[in-house]
Image (cartoon, grey):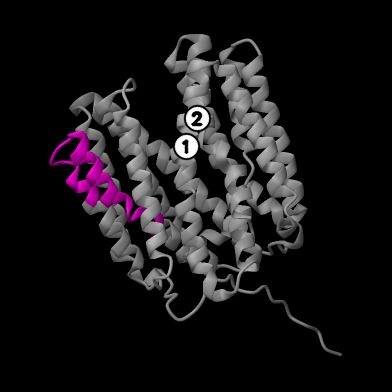
Amino acid sequence: MIAAQLTARFPMGMTSLAVLLHVQHTTGSYGDAGLVLAAASVGQAVAGPVTSRWMGSWGIRQVLALTTVVCAASITALSLLPPLLPLDMVLGALAGISTPPVQSAVRTIYPKLVNSTQLTPLFSLDASLQEIIWIVAPVLVTFVSTQISTVVGLLMIVVILLGGGAWFILSPEVGRVRIPRSRRAFGRVLLRPAVLLATIIGFLLIGACAAVEAGVVATFGHGGLDAGLVLAVFSLGSLAGGLLSGSIPIGRWAMTRRLAIVAGGLALTLVSLDVWWLGGSLVVAGIGIAPALAVLFAMTSASVKFSDTAEAFGWVGTGQLIGAAAGSAIAGFLIDGAGSVGAFITAIGFAAVGLVVAVVFVRGFPDLRFRDASPIPDTEPVHLP
């Protein structure tokens, strides 16, 4: 199941970069490429909670199959049709709207696959292994798009999207799990303090990561290996942190401790932007990222009814998408004004605000040291004669 969902989600680490390279290559304008990417990001952010909730009404396999086919068709059309900005924006938005909600699906399924004592370590393992996507996918799509063709790069994404999606959709575990139809109004799940906190902190944490990526690229440029290597060790730090923290119980202060590691590591980047110092600082920061994400997943799962789990994870994912866009945008603005150090100041700011939120609202975090992270069972009144 982990291998299938990682493969199905692998295109998510490639699509934005591939679209950027393709639109810029075909139109000669980074501005046009940015507009297409913005349309795709807005579509994905808006649709995430909606398509996730549909899985409780229509079934997991049906929603995943529909979105996978539509998304693949949109990317194929974008790669093959002549460049025309309005059309490219429509296709980008359609690809974003139809992004398969694999992440929401698999994190809804996990509580049904393992016993209660294994669920928190499984969330931690999942948060760690997803770093493989962000290490390998950008390198692969950049190599194919620049050395062969941007069209081939996009079509490669379509092949992986269809193949990985089919593998995940046809997995027996996906067929065995049935998400009950939610009885709550759309969006009501955000009234749960833990879900709202997970969405806000996910926004801030991923915003910090996006700012770091912008800062590393601005520091070392696109041409050399230094930027790729520094980002790789950043992800490897996160991978190691997630694997090491999987068995640590999650209390109310767990998020605070893990965000403190992230903020502390990012603060060290201000000492020097030398490749060795920056790489070491980001390893330290990375050690807290996957463990913090594991807390987000566990607290979300443990705080809602099973019928609301998919929608809750959809909102958390939307928060992360908006955070990535905000972090990149603010970092880009400060890079223009203050140089690459401005991006790292942005990252520190996002992480520091996340740390403050975790401290101030610590009572909103569930204490999972003496209970499991399984969703609240769906119950309904039974009428007796």
For the point 60% across and 74% down, which residue is it? 115
Outermost left residue: 271
Foreground pick, 136 / 93: 136
Residue 309 in percent (x, y) is at 60, 61
| Label 1 neighbour load within 10 Å: few <14, some 14-19, many 20+ | some
For the point 71% across and 59% down, which residue is it? 173
> Seen in the image, is 147 located left or right of residue 351?
right
- State the predominant SS element of the stretch in magenta: helix
Residue 218 in percent (x, y) is at 28, 27
- Disc 2 marks a residue whose amino acid type is Leu
| Label 2 neighbour load within 10 Å: few <14, some 14-19, many 20+ | few
Find disc 1 in the rendering and name its residue: 136
Q: Is residue 34 visible?
A: yes
Quadrant into which the N terminus falls: bottom right
Outermost right residue: 385
Find disc 2 in the rendering and name its residue: 140
- Determine which of the numbered discs, if any, sits on residue 108 in the image: none
For the point 40% across and 73% down, which residue is it? 249
| Magenta region | 265-291
For the point 42% across and 36% down, which residue is it? 325
Label 1 and label 2: CA atoms lie apart by 6 Å
Judge whether 86 appears above or below 307 on screen: above
> Seen in the image, is 186 located left or right of residue 148?
right
Give residue 71's quadrant in the image.
Answer: top right
- Disc 1 marks a residue whose amino acid type is Val
Assign a secondary structure to mark 1: helix
Q: Are marks 1 and 2 in contact (CB under 8 Å)?
A: yes
> Seen in the image, is 351 located left or right of residue 6?
left
Residue 148 in percent (x, y) is at 54, 16
Numbered disc total: 2
